[in-house]
């Protein structure tokens, strides 16, 4: 198989070592990429530094024009990019296409957002005026996970380039293919060589070399808490700012007065989308005791009717990303002392049409209590844990009862209940009578507690990729 090279300074760069990329629907190797080491990382950072020296001086209107061109090219290639995203991650085809559409929107959105992203000016006193202005960091390092490769690229690369930074991006070893395509599109759009470099490779080698390189000025990381801590240490050694978008154990809270017809399909989607491999997955269901039986029965019915299959057949639920990820889900659900009552699923799907893909059945576990691992640890699989509450206080306590604080869904028709939950819940996003797993280009996103710090998405997302300079001018 011909190696897909890194893209550094606008040129393909091959390496002797390679990374095989599996199709999780079949377990077969679908591509091999370069495996970058410190040498390639150094080349990429140096190229980005050189490009950044002139890119930061490029007029905002010209930067925005290139972002819009990039957006148009992604739209032109939407079908092939969406297909490739679906195939390499195992997500249903329509979700891969949706992810490509959202990536189109990120480049468009940040083209517009940066054009009205002004500093301030104010008189300090009679003879002194002050100007604040936003300046880029220089080279931004992006460490990307495998669950939403294009979306997460879009939400960090688009604002970074818009602000005048240049980018070195290490995609996840499991799903690096669309990032390589997007870097080619950036060249076609007319971005200077070196503005957007992609260095595939493993986390412990390529990722570690990138986050330790003294030429970078900023890190944006999306992934696990464990690796987030390693990267926070690397950022501390370099003294560069870092955005940490980590995990979650996000709940949907369903109150007695909720509209269940509306809630059920959204709750189901919030955990089954992307096989539950979404940092903002709705992996806990907290339900008022008076409606517990009805709600759980409806969700179980949905789970039993889910079509599971290969990504490109556009099922409701595709495979998990890899063998190790499926093993992790298996061990979580089957561990002795797991607690709760298994209502649906609870096992991998093998044989027959499933072949050697990494399929796992939609799994509903009822009567979960806060002392159980399944209540507070992230599974990253299609596994929903149900817990009941009796009072509003108890609902808040359960919602806030994990180390995470990424997203919460509140289902109620009572505006006071909704307001109270918005006030009391410790999470970066609170949805009322809706729930957005992924997407949400306009919505500032990021975690409280162990879910991370810093915000991406929305106009707020530009700030993370810039620093304020204050000029004080005395007459
Ligand atoms: P996930 O649980 O989604 O696989 P990880 O945190 O393991 O999340 O990986 C997210 C990204 O971090 C991937 O691109 C991976 O290669 C990278 N990574 C893993 N270990 C390191 C490390 N020590 N230094 C830098 N990047 C790493």
Image (cartoon, rainbow, N blue to C red):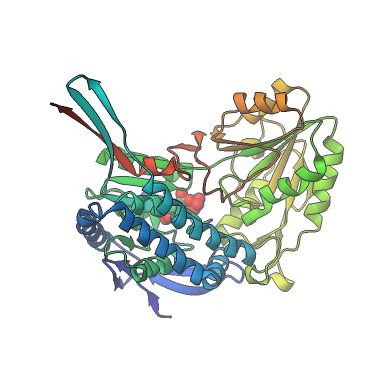
Where is residue 35 shown, x and y percent of the image?
35, 66
Where is residue 155 shown, x and y percent of the image?
45, 51
Image quadrant in which the C terminus is located: top left
Camera-side residue of 48 and 249: 48
Q: Residue furthest front?
A: 126
Where is residue 426 shown, x and y percent of the image?
57, 29
Camera-side residue of 323 and 289: 289
Residue in the picture at 56% in, 33% down: 427
Where is residue 409 shown, x and y percent of the image?
66, 37
Count of marks overlaid on the render = 0
Q: Is residue 121 left or right of residue 157?
A: left
Q: Relative to 107, say whether 25 is above or below.
A: below
Camera-side residue of 348 and 421: 421
Q: Is residue 168 left or right of residue 414?
A: left
The answer to whether residue 329 shows anywhere in this view is yes
Residue in the picture at 57% in, 55% down: 325
Q: Residue furthest left?
A: 475
Q: Is residue 30 left or right of residue 290?
A: left
Residue in the picture at 33% in, 51% down: 141
Residue in the picture at 44% in, 58% down: 172
Question: Based on the displayed image, in which of its 4 quarters is residue 263 positioned?
Answer: top right
Camera-side residue of 139 and 311: 139
Q: Is residue 158 left or right of residue 210?
A: right
């Amino acid at each position: 198989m011909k190696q897909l090279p890194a893209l550094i300074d606008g040129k393909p760069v091959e390496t002797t070592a390679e990374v095989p990329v599996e199709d999780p629907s079949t377990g077969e190797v679908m591509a091999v990429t370069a495996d970058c080491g410190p040498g390639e990382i150094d080349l990429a950072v140096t190229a980005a530094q050189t490009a950044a020296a002139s890119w930061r001086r490029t007029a905002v209107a010209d930067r925005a024009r290139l972002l819009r061109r990039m957006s148009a090219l992604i739209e032109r290639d939407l079908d092939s990019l969406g297909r490739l995203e679906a195939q390499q991650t195992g997500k249903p085809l329509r979700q891969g296409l949706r992810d490509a559409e959202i990536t189109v929107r990120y480049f468009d959105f940040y083209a517009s957002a940066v054009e009205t992203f002004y500093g301030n000016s104010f008189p300090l006193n009679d003879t002194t005026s002050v100007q604040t202005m936003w300046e880029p960091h220089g080279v931004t390092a992006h460490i990307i996970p495998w669950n939403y490769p294009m979306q997460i690229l879009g939400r960090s690369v688009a604002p970074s380039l818009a602000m005048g930074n240049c980018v070195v991006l290490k995609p996840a070893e499991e799903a690096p293919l669309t990032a390589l395509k997007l870097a080619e599109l950036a060249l076609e759009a007319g971005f200077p060589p070196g503005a957007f470099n992609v260095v595939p490779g493993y986390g412990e080698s390529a990722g570690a070399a990138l986050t330790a390189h003294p030429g970078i000025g900023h890190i944006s990381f999306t992934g696990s808490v464990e690796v987030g801590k390693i990267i926070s240490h690397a950022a501390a050694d370099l003294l560069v700012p870092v955005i940490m978008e980590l995990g979650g154990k996000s709940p949907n809270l369903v109150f007695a007065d909720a509209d269940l017809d509306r809630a059920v399909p959204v709750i189901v989607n919030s955990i089954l989308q992307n096989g539950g491999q979404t940092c903002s997955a709705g992996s806990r269901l907290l339900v008022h005791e008076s409606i517990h039986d009805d709600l759980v029965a409806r969700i179980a019915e949905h789970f039993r009717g889910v079509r599971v299959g290969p990504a490109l057949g556009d099922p409701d639920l595709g495979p998990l990303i890899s063998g190790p990820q499926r093993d992790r889900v298996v061990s979580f659900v089957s561990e002795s002392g797991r607690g709760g009552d298994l209502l649906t699923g609870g096992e991998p799907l093998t044989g027959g049409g499933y072949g050697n893909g990494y399929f796992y059945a939609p799994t509903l576990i009822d009567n979960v209590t806060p002392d159980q691992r399944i209540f507070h640890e992230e599974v990253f699989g299609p596994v929903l844990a149900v817990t009941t509450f009796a009072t509003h206080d108890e609902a808040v306590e359960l919602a806030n009862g994990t180390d995470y604080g990424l997203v919460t869904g509140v289902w109620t028709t009572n505006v006071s209940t909704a307001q109270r939950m918005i006030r009391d819940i410790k999470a970066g996003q609170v949805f009322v009578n809706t729930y957005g797993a992924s997407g949400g280009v306009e919505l500032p996103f990021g975690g409280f507690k162990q879910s991370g710090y810093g915000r991406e998405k929305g106009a707020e997302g530009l700030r993370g990729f810039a620093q304020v300079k204050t000029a004080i001018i005395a007459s």
